[in-house]
């Protein structure tokens, strides 16, 4: 029996076989195509209605989403050759089907008829927005193209799905293929005990003696921050910064160099087919920002306001390394190490020393307490749920009336064959199905160190902030009250506003009232001592201008390669990155660095010509949080307003309207600069 064919409940992960995946997707697509064609044929302009057309269309789409979600997720968190093969075989089918539906003239006409009859049918504002979004998306899918151009569009989409998947797989394989084994603990001098214990545990898990360093972030970062051995830092930095490239110690079979120009060329061709000047323009068709000029102006303005302070921060670091350690020249693999030393000197605080106060269970409990106080919800862990790994936890969310409203999986630890980074993905979306409400379910995934020996999982403050970020995305997905799948949760939200709830929630990791709930010693239960708390908060904006410029560098690079792409110049990616760095960065990057080869956000994720969204949404989140600062961090009215105007509304209204409804005015850049400690 194929478990993926008619999922009505949570995915039975232990029963899902790789051999089921392609079979299920093929069958569901074929049946969906037939049902949609029959549905379209049954409509006429006089009898068409929301109930007879949109509702059954929603059910058809939900069935495919419910099957594809666990397949895609398993490919990311328990990757194997069999799962990867099945996943890759599904991609062209999904791409072809998506293109076919996006260019389906009959389907388009029915939606157009419904939109034309909106007044006659007394459609509500949400239904009208869904139809208008659909019509926009039809046009972006090439519904108006000639038959010849439609075929070209379809071929481009299939090839792009293959390339972006290959990009992600090369990055994962390159990351997993490299390791360094060390015989003696003395070679790890400077590393905190937790990192040494983790390296020993990794070695034991791979049946080797000594200590193993990998390129997974929980292993990589402690080396860069703490290893006294400069040669070791250089070796690990080189391996990490050249992943999936022709540089460094990696096998060339994982090289993404040839994939990137082809991805950009295909995106450029797609944009031109649809009468846009560039893929950047095409990208903005579904975002809050109105034009290429507006985005570039926004980024340049932030850069100009941050650059002098960033220069000062860099000069301070150079002088410190020279005066205190006799280090005359700072290389790329020295920056994090000496920054950590400088931070320690200025604030007498480090991420590692804070770990004992951030044990997993307390952090999760505190996060729940904060969101309970803000949004009047509660959480109950459930242990009878089938998951993809024993470390995965599962929680149900209840509203103030004690009614179950949503659920989520929590997968916190790094492990072999799991994609790096942290993310939220939807398992099930909210919608009204007949008389029932289908409740939303989310996947929340991170890559932190798990328990070591007898110690529980102990997080750094940075990791706690990452968890809050992803949980903010999860709340956006799960607390929606919208009953239409197309605009419930994060669906239908402008991409440059989708980071608002996630970045907003991070703020509670940086205020005393929030830290009181999440920081308690794993052994004694004691809160974070007052002196450590004061030093942590004082260090919040350490090198904040340098970090601001780093994100702006990524954003401008992304936007430029998608706005000024020249298909006749395959070397332009590196050239544009070098140019942006020369204009923006205060840090000199080694020539061998191939950051772009691992920039999966834009080459394999949803952030192509949209990486600026992080900064755009950070303006919104900082401004939103400033209202809490003005009226009370846990003020129940402000929390309720954020719930009602942002989290519950999903994509049912334009993001700018929702923000103004919450804040009472247009967004301002000033709170972000203030929160970042950047003086202008």
Image: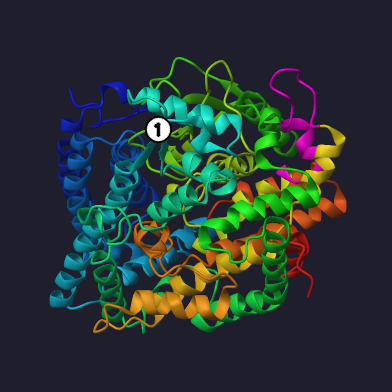
Residue 661 is left or right of residue 292, and the answer is right
User: In what element is the residue under mark 1?
Assistant: loop
10 Å crowding of disc 1: few (<14), some (14-19), many (20+): some
Where is residue 413 drawn, in percent x and y?
A: 48, 32
Asked if residue 286 can be seen in this view, the reply is yes
Where is residue 424 drawn, in percent x and y?
A: 48, 43
> In front here: 355 or 560?
355
Rendered-image quadrant of the N terminus: top left
Q: Quadrant of residue 466?
A: top right
Residue 140 is one of the magenta-drawn residues: no
Rendered-image quadrant of the C terminus: bottom right
What residue would you read off at disc 1? 415
Q: Is residue 118 above or below residue 304?
A: above
Asked if residue 655 can be seen in this view, the reply is no
Where is residue 13 drawn, in percent x and y?
A: 32, 25
Q: Quadrant of residue 625?
A: bottom right
Residue 525 is one of the magenta-drawn residues: yes
Secondary structure mostly seen in magenta is loop
> In front here: 181 or 532?
181
Where is residue 175 drawn, in percent x and y?
A: 35, 46
Q: Is residue 52 above or below residue 103?
A: above
Q: Which residues are magenta?
A: 509-528
Identity of the residue drawn at 59% across and 19% down: 455
């Amino acid at each position: 029996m194929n478990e993926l064919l008619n999922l009505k409940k949570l995915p039975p992960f232990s029963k899902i076989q790789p051999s089921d995946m392609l079979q299920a997707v093929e069958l569901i697509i074929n049946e969906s195509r037939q049902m949609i064609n029959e549905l379209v044929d049954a409509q006429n302009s006089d009898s068409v209605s929301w109930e007879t057309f949109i509702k059954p269309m929603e059910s058809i789409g939900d069935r495919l989403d419910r099957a594809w979600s666990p397949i895609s997720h398993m490919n990311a968190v328990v990757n194997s050759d069999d799962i990867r093969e099945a996943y890759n075989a599904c991609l062209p089918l999904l791409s072809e089907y998506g293109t076919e539906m996006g260019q389906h003239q009959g389907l388009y006409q029915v939606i157009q008829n419904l939109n034309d009859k909106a007044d006659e049918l007394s459609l509500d504002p949400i239904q009208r927005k869904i139809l208008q979004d659909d019509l926009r998306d039809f046009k972006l899918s090439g519904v108006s193209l000639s038959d010849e151009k439609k075929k070209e569009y379809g071929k481009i989409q299939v090839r792009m799905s293959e390339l972006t998947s290959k990009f992600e797989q090369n990055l994962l394989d390159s990351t997993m293929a490299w390791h360094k084994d060390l015989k003696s603990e003395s070679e790890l001098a400077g590393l905190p005990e937790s990192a040494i214990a983790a390296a020993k545990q990794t070695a034991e898990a791979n049946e080797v003696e000594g200590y193993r360093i990998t390129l997974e972030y929980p292993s990589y970062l402690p080396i860069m921050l703490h290893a006294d051995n400069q040669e070791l830092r250089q070796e690990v930095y080189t391996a990490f910064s050249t992943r999936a490239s022709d540089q460094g110690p990696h096998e060339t079979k994982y090289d993404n160099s040839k994939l990137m120009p082809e991805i950009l060329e295909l995106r450029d061709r797609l944009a031109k087919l649809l009468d846009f000047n560039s893929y950047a323009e095409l990208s903005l068709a579904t975002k809050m920002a109105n034009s290429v000029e507006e985005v570039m102006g926004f980024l340049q303005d932030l850069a100009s306001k941050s650059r002098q302070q960033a220069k000062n921060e860099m000069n301070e670091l150079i002088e410190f390394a020279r005066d205190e350690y006799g280090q005359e020249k700072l290389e790329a693999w020295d920056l994090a190490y000496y920054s950590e030393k400088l931070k320690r000197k200025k604030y007498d605080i480090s991420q590692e020393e804070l770990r004992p106060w951030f044990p997993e269970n307390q952090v999760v409990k505190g996060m729940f307490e904060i969101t309970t106080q803000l949004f009047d919800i509660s959480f109950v862990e459930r242990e009878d749920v089938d998951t993809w790994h024993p470390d995965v936890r599962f929680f149900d969310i209840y509203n103030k009336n004690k009614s179950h409203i949503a659920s989520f999986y929590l997968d916190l630890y790094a492990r072999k064959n799991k994609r790096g980074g942290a993310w939220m993905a939807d398992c099930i979306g909210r919608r009204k199905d007949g008389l029932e409400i289908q409740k939303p379910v989310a996947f929340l995934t991170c890559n932190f160190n798990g328990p070591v020996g007898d110690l529980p999982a102990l997080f750094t403050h940075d990791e706690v902030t990452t968890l809050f970020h992803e949980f903010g995305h999860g709340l956006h997905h799960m607390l929606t009250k919208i009953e239409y799948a197309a605009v419930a949760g994060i669906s239908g939200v402008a991409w440059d506003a989708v980071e608002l709830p996630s970045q907003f929630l991070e703020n509670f990791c940086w205020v005393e009232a929030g830290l009181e709930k999440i920081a308690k010693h794993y052994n004694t239960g004691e809160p974070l001592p007052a002196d450590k708390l004061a030093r942590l908060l004082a260090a919040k904006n350490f090198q904040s201008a340098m970090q601001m410029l780093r994100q702006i560098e990524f954003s401008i690079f992304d936007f430029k390669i998608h706005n000024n792409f020249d298909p006749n110049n395959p070397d332009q990616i590196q050239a544009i990155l070098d140019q942006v760095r020369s204009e923006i960065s205060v840090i000199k990057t080694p020539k061998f660095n191939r950051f772009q080869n691992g920039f999966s956000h834009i080459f394999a994720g949803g952030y192509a010509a949209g990486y600026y969204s992080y900064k755009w949404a950070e303006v919104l989140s900082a401004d939103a949080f400033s209202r809490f600062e003005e009226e009370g961090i846990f003020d129940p009215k402000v929390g309720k307003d954020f719930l009602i105007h942002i989290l519950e509304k999903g994509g049912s209204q334009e993001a700018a309207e929702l923000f103004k409804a919450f804040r009472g005015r247009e967004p301002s850049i000033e709170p972000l600069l203030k929160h970042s400690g950047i003086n202008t």
